Amino acid sequence: MYDIVVDLLSAKLGIRKSDISKTSDLRKDLHCDSLTMVELSLAFQDELGIAEIPDETLAEIHTVNDLVRCAENMVKK
């Protein structure tokens, strides 16, 4: 799942995969604002076939690893 998340982040944010790590902070390190987070959520819905990630959950996602765990949990549902 980590590789899928990194691929998606790289494509959507226009940054090199090598610049993304599990501990990268989405807002501080990767410069994601709230609109970008919603766009990423929609991209994950399309890519993984998951339900919409609730706004409350998006607000709790801070790192790439948080996003990976969220995606894994959503896929399991």
Image: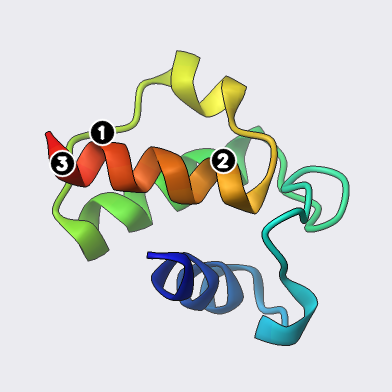
Q: How many C-alpha atoms fall within 10 Å of the one at disc 3: few (<14), some, or many (≥20)?
A: few
Q: Are marks 3 and 1 in contact (CB under 8 Å)?
A: no
Q: Position of residue 39 (x, y in %)?
A: 47, 48
Q: Is residue 28 above or below residue 52?
A: below
Q: Secondary structure at mark 3?
A: helix
Q: Which residue is mark 2?
A: 66
Q: Residue at x 54, y 71 (%)?
A: 6
In the rendered image, the quadrant that contains the C terminus is top left
Out of 53 and 24, give the one closest to the viewer. 24
- Counting residues from the N terminus, which is met first, the one under dot 3 or under dot 1? 1
First-in-chain label (3 vs 2):
2
Q: Nearer the viewer, residue 4 or 52?
A: 4
Label 1 SS: loop
Residue 50 in which image quadrant: top left
Closest to the observer: 16 or 69? 69
In the rendered structure, the answer to whether residue 61 lies left or right of residue 24 reads left
CA distance for labels 1 and 2: 16 Å
Q: From the image, tell me which residue sits under label 3.
A: 76
Location of residue 12 in the rendering, given as x and y in whole percent from the top left corner: 54, 69
Image point 40% across, 72% down: which residue? 4
As drawn, the label of residue 17 is: none
Disc number for residue 52: 1
